[in-house]
Amino acid sequence: MCRERRRKCDIRRPGLACTYCSARNLTCTRAESSVAKAPESVSDKSTPVSRSDALLESESGTLPEQPLCRDLVQLYFDYVHDKFHSLFHRPSLVEDMLRGQAPKILIYGMLALSARFSTHPFFADIDPRERGREFAKRCEELLDLNDVSVTTIQACVLLGAIGVVDGKPASETIYYAVACRIAQLLDLPNCQAANRVEQEIYIRVWWTLCMIDVWSSTGVRLPRLLTPKPNTPLPMNEATFLQMNREQGFTVEVETDRASSLLAQMVLLNRILCEINDFNIEAAEASLTTTYIMTRISDLSAKLDRWLAELPVHMHDTRANLVSFASDGLGQLFVTLYLGYYHYGQMLFYRFLHEDLRSYVPRTHFYANKCKDHAVLLCEMIYSSEEVPGCDVLYNMVGHVLVIASTVQIHTLLFGVDNEGIAQARRRLERNFCILTRLRGLWPTLDICMERLQAFHRACRRSVDTSFCMDGWMVRFLVEFGHPVSEREGNGVEERPWTLEEIGIS
């Protein structure tokens, strides 16, 4: 490139790309000719040093060698991708990385999120929550907001996710906002693609942004940025997508009915979440009539029921289906889908836990029980994910939804009349606390989740009768997962025959 430009080719160190190519993420042919023979990797002596070693090397020495980088990218796809967001075609990204053609900014972003899962001796003396710091910093340094491209969108989403897990909601919001705006500038769903794989990546990134926009904007109580385009196709079947390659161009035939895609079903569910969030906020901020509230809840409940009824049989929540998806490498995505469904249900029906205590009304009692059912099934899905190989979900939002489900178990402990039901709720709380503690060892933002659970516990101790009331405090508790909650005002302390300390939550 420099020869063609008739400019001096400036290489800072053997093995690195020249300054011109490095600044533009171009493949630098001189990097190959200048690289010295590197020592064999301790972790994989059979793997030769390739150009991707030069690609991933940094002047500060913060990145490990290529074999470990490959392992960390694998961990990113195992535990982060398709749970936080869907940005890449896994086979193509891995191929590009091995060839030294993957944008460095994206590799840094992926490693920043995945290093916490590694058991490699390289990270033995580093707290899992701190391992991604230098990778994240390098990713930020490489971000060029003048580069209006899909790569910049992907990098901003990665940086937004890093903001989420570090408990920095302002940083998260800014990066996601930039990603949304660039997607709008590019008209991403209709952006011209070189092949079917690239086209599907654009579709998946667009829907990822639409889903992120719902929960991220709600979490900081800001207006949403994106309006889904009605003619944009939903994501295709995951197995079909993963089997495609770029060399096939547009010759691959894909189904027009996208119902078999787990990600497409997540998109459909997310539309209902958008309405649930809006309703909960509206109900907390305005004086609504009982008729209006019940009509809206009945409508939203019917939408959740309809979504579930229209699922293909092979997507129903059964152990057999979970095992089947796990065998195809999609077990974690299947679990993520149902965690969303059960969480949205407990969010919708949560208000009836308090209403059911005030007076017995058949419909109120019915909805209160639906909230409890959703919370129980959410817990059981997480337990199943631990028992079936290839299904374990370790992303940070598991902590938030599990905290909400745990408060429903607290309701059963406080007000339940069935001894067996109370005993089961206590066992779930114990197990949930163990899961939250493990997740807290990976994600800094789980400190906030635990503080929120403790704040809820204190609110229950201060005033049991009002602790489940759906007011402004409760709405913030349910949706603003990235922020600590203030202490809830109450009227005195009611003594109870149990405390959360008795089951290990202090």
Image: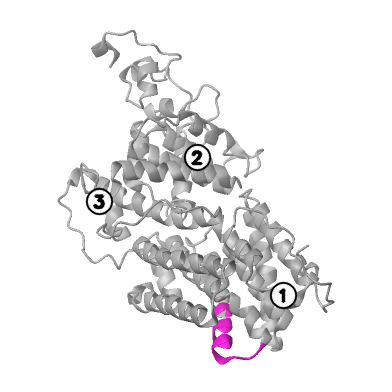
Look at the numbered discs 2 and 1 and tell me whether their residues touch, using CB distance below 8 Å: no
Q: Which mark is residue 111?
A: 2
- Mark whose residue sits in front, 2 or 1: 1
Looking at the picture, tell me which residue is in the foreground, 460 or 89. Answer: 460
Residue 93 on the magenta segment: no
Residue type, mark 1 in image: Thr
Which quadrant would the N terminus be assigned to in this image?
A: top left
Residue type, mark 2 in image: Leu
> Residue 374 is drawn in which quadrant?
bottom right
Q: Which mark is residue 466?
A: 1
Q: Which mark is residue 244?
A: 3
> Distance of mark 3 from mark 1, alpha carbons?
55 Å
Residue 367 on the magenta segment: yes
Which region shows up in magenta?
359-372
Q: Position of residue 233 (x, y in %)?
A: 26, 58
> Distance of mark 2 from mark 3, alpha carbons?
25 Å
Which structural element holds mark 2?
A: helix
